Structures are given as C-alpha cells and as structure tokens.
Image: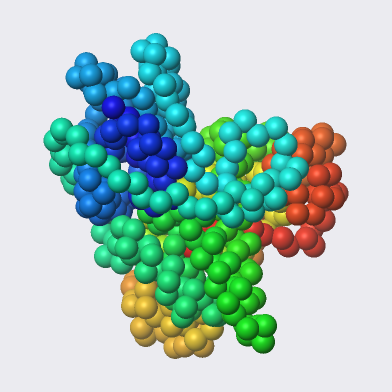
C-alpha cells in the first residue's frame, strides 16, 4: 500500500505526493498527531485548533475522492512500524518539510527507519524551497518556473480497509488554554474564500494599507495560515494572482501595483524559508556569530512578561500585542516592531521573545519566523539595524487612535491628543500607575544605548568577512551587487517583513 504522510500540506489539490502515490497503487492517506511535537516550546493551542479544523475538512475531501484521512497518534516511526506489521506499507510518500529543529530530527529518524526496513520514501518538493541548494544564483528564475507548472489534480482513490481514528482536541494533547477568539478558521474552503475575496475586492489597497494595523486587517491577503499549514498551495496562489493581474486593464494602476507588490511577497515567503533549509541553526544561534555575547542569554523576566502581556506603558506597542493575543494575526510592520522593541529597547536575547511570538502567530512558519526574528534583532550581520520608535509608529499607523482605543479600554479617560503619550496628559496621574502601567523603559534613551552597542560590534575588523560569507549564502540575487556585503551605513533603513503573505 502507498502511504501518503500529510504534514504541512493539508490539501488534495496540487499535492504531488498524493497524485503520484495514487498512480502507484492503493493509497492510505495518513496524518500522525505527534504528542512530543506539541510539547515543544514553539507549539500552541491556536496552532492545533487551526490544524484540527483543516484536518476535519481534509478528511471529508479525501472521503469524496474515495478514501478518508486516517489519523493516528504517537511517534511516526512507531505508527509506520505498526503498518508494516499489518502488511499495509509498501512505500511512503510525503512532501519535504522545512520545519523546526524537532521535525528535522524526526525526519532523520524516519529516513533511518525506512532504510533499515527497505521501505522507499519518496519526498517531493512542496513549494519554492530546494534541498541541498548549492547557490542562490538563479533562485528567483527557478521559483518562477516551478510556480508556472500545472497544479496536480486531486486523484481518485480506491477505498482501503482502515479505521479513520479521532482528531484529538488541544486539551487531549495537553496544550492548555489559549484564549484567541479572533483566530482565523482553518480549512481549505476558508483559504479559498480568502484568496478569492482578496483578489476580487479586498486587495485593491494592499500596497497602501498593508502597514496599517487597522486597514491591514482587511487589505492584507490573510492567506498566511493557509499557506503555512498547506490548506492552499503557493502555486495556486501565485497562478491566481497572475491570472487576476493579466485580466486587469492597464489603466487600473492601483490594483496592478498592489498585485505586483503581493507577488513580490510570495517570492519572499519561500526566500526566507530557504534560509532555514540551508542553515537550520538560525532557529537557535545568531547567524552572525560576533553577536553571540551581545545580550544576556537569560532574559529579564519582568520586562519579558510585561512585553508579552502588552503592559509596557507604550499604548501602540501594547495594543499590537493584545491584538495578536486575541486574533493570532498582526500585519508585518507591527510584527517587526514588537520584535525590535524586545531586542533593542528591552535588550532581550531574541530566543525567548521569538518563542512567544511563534506561539501567538497562527501562521507560524519556522523558516520565515526565525529568519525574521534575527533580522529584526540585528543579528544577521547583513541587514540594516532598524530600531522602531513605538511612539512614532503609533502616530504614523494609528493617527486617530482607533486601534489603541479598541485594545486598551483602560485609556478611555486619556484625551485623544495624548493617547500615544498618555504620560503627558493633564490627568495622567489618575490613570498611569492605576488603570494602565507606567513605562518600563525610556524609548529614546533605550534606542540610543542599543544602537551604540550594535554598532560597536559592526565596527570590529573581523565583522565584514563573516557578513560577506552570509551574503553569498543567503542574500537575494535580485540585486547582484548584494553578493558583496556593503560597508555599514547608519542611514540605510531597509527592513524586510515578517509574515510575507499576511
């Protein structure tokens, strides 16, 4: 029997492993719920809630094709061993996965088991990320060529004798509580609806509005969780975007600019995952090793907890964190600001804040996440130091205070003109320190101190050699001059976003 192991590819359309396995013989579609994976520090109930909903729909879709999804709980090797004893496994099929360190080690164990048992394991490319990539040269061209290939159709499946098995709850997995009332609904149908509504209605102002935490809720595609867990494929989204762009009249410049911008972010999605594929250590270690002793490895617990709870005393920053807690989503600029404040103003090592954000993002994609966490923390060595001013960002992105008012009702008594700096209001003493916390840092002084420490490292004579090696291995080839690391300039303000397709 051909066993198709579903991982981050929870769909039946454009599923190369499923299509090819069906041509080889009867298929057993399998999803393994791995309790040890869900005990990892980057896992959360909101992730599983989204996946469980997607699995339920996937089971229905596979059932309509002829064979429902089979769900088993335990270690993958143990599940495969059981199938072998039953004579139900002749070949294993799956897509390649660029997950966290735990899934990387698990896949190594599965590969070793397959070799030992003589079971062929066919791993196929899932999206625009290449295993054992030797050079980034030509990467974008290869990506475009891959995305232009036809999507594999959902195959007919002959029914096989199997017990579907239950889809456990978050409580069953010991994940505890996670109040996220605004989490996006899982499942392919919801993902397809998001894609259609973005390309036909919501996306017209994408380029203009994506940086706003208010307008971005609607103007952004909101496809990121469906791409992260594979309810829709990158190829499907890319082709739909291109078809929509070609159908637009040349005079419709707003739509055309937005769709072009969205296309660029689809490229960046895989570009960042490729970084983790090429160098898995970025989940755990500074990409540029001269930053290893820059910040204390043990975080200041009080500062970390205030940041996590949205209680730093900076209204716009706190509103962003509380919105994320309640919805599982935040637009890319605000994600970058949250991480930058933790790293620069609070001077926290990126690992603990990065894990918290991983748990909060319903669309957690390890490759994008850890590359961006390091980028926004200034530890890549090849990206510009960008220290977001949380007060200025509030004025820029929430000038009327609508977003702050939504998430910080305790500031109701603060007049509008002081909402971004409530400590300056005439009635500040009645609110600050009572209904709303006092500031836990001075944003101007903290930014100055952080900038000096970062640049002290960047000016070291050995810094550039490491940076040039990182550029050669990881940098985009859109501008080939970037293959040589430029001399650092304080004025350079390039910043690339979290959640590229958010």
Q: Quadrant of the N terminus?
A: top left
The residue at the point 67 percent across, 83 percent down is 250
**Percent x, y for residue 206?**
55, 75
Location of residue 431 by image quarter: bottom left
Q: Is residue 485 above or below residue 325?
A: above
The residue at the point 24 percent across, 29 percent down is 74
**Percent x, y for residue 466?**
77, 35
**Percent x, y for residue 248?**
59, 80
The residue at the point 19 percent across, 19 percent down is 86
Q: Residue 32: tell me if it is visible.
A: no
The residue at the point 30 percent across, 46 percent down is 156
Pick whichever, 476 or 417, lies toward us. Answer: 476
Q: Residue 410: tell me if it is visible.
A: yes
**Percent x, y for residue 419?**
47, 81
Q: How is the image coloured?
A: rainbow
The number of numbered discs placed on residues in the rendered structure image is 0
Pick whichever, 285 or 315, lies toward us. Answer: 285
Left or right, residue 494 beside residue 106: right
Q: Is residue 256 above or below residue 43?
A: below
Left or right, residue 493 beside residue 358: right
Q: Is residue 435 above or below residue 448?
A: below
């Amino acid at each position: 029997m051909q066993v198709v192991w579903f991982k981050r590819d929870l769909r039946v359309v454009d599923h190369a492993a499923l299509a090819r396995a069906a041509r080889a013989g009867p298929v057993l579609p399998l999803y393994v719920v791995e309790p040890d994976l869900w005990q990892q520090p980057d896992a959360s109930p909101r992730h599983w809630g989204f996946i469980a909903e997607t699995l339920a729909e996937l089971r229905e879709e596979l059932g309509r094709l002829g064979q429902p999804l089979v769900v088993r709980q335990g270690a993958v090797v143990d599940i495969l061993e059981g199938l072998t004893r039953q004579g139900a496994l002749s070949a294993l099929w799956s897509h390649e996965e660029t997950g966290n360190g735990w899934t990387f080690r698990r896949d190594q164990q599965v590969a070793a088991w397959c070799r030992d048992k003589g079971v062929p394991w066919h791993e196929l490319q899932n999206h625009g990320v290449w295993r054992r990539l030797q050079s980034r040269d030509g990467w974008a061209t290869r990506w475009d060529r891959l995305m232009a290939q036809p999507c594999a159709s959902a195959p007919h499946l002959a029914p096989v004798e199997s017990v579907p098995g239950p889809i456990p709850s978050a409580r069953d997995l010991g994940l505890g509580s996670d109040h996220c009332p605004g989490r996006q609904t899982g499942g392919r149908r919801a993902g397809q609806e998001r894609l259609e509504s973005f390309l036909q209605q919501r996306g017209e102002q994408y380029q203009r509005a994506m940086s706003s935490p208010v307008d971005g809720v609607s103007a952004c595609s909101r496809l990121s969780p469906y791409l992260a867990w594979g309810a829709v494929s990158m190829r499907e989204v890319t082709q739909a975007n291109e078809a929509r762009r070609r159908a637009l009249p040349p005079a419709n410049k707003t739509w055309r600019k937005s769709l072009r911008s969205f296309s660029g972010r689809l490229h960046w999605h895989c570009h960042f995952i490729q970084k983790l594929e090429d160098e898995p250590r970025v989940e755990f270690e500074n990409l540029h090793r001269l930053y290893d002793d820059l910040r204390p490895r043990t975080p200041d617990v009080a500062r970390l907890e205030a940041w996590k709870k949205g209680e730093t005393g900076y209204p716009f920053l706190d509103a962003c964190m509380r919105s994320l807690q309640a919805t599982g989503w935040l637009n890319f600029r605000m994600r970058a600001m949250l991480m930058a404040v933790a790293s620069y103003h609070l001077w926290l090592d990126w690992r603990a804040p990065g894990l918290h954000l991983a748990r909060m993002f319903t669309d957690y994609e390890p490759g994008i996440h850890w590359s961006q966490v390091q980028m926004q923390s200034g530890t890549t060595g090849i990206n510009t130091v960008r220290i977001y001013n949380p007060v200025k960002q509030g004025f820029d992105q929430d000038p009327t205070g609508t977003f702050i008012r939504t998430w910080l009702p305790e500031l109701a008594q603060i007049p509008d003109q002081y909402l971004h700096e409530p400590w300056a209001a005439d009635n500040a003493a009645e609110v600050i320190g009572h209904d709303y916390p006092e500031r836990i840092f001075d944003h101007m002084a903290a930014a100055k101190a952080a900038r000096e420490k970062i640049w002290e490292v960047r000016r070291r004579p050995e810094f550039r050699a490491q940076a040039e090696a990182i550029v050669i291995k990881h940098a985009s080839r859109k501008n080939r001059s970037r293959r040589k690391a430029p001399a650092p300039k304080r004025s350079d303000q390039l910043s690339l976003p979290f959640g590229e397709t958010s």
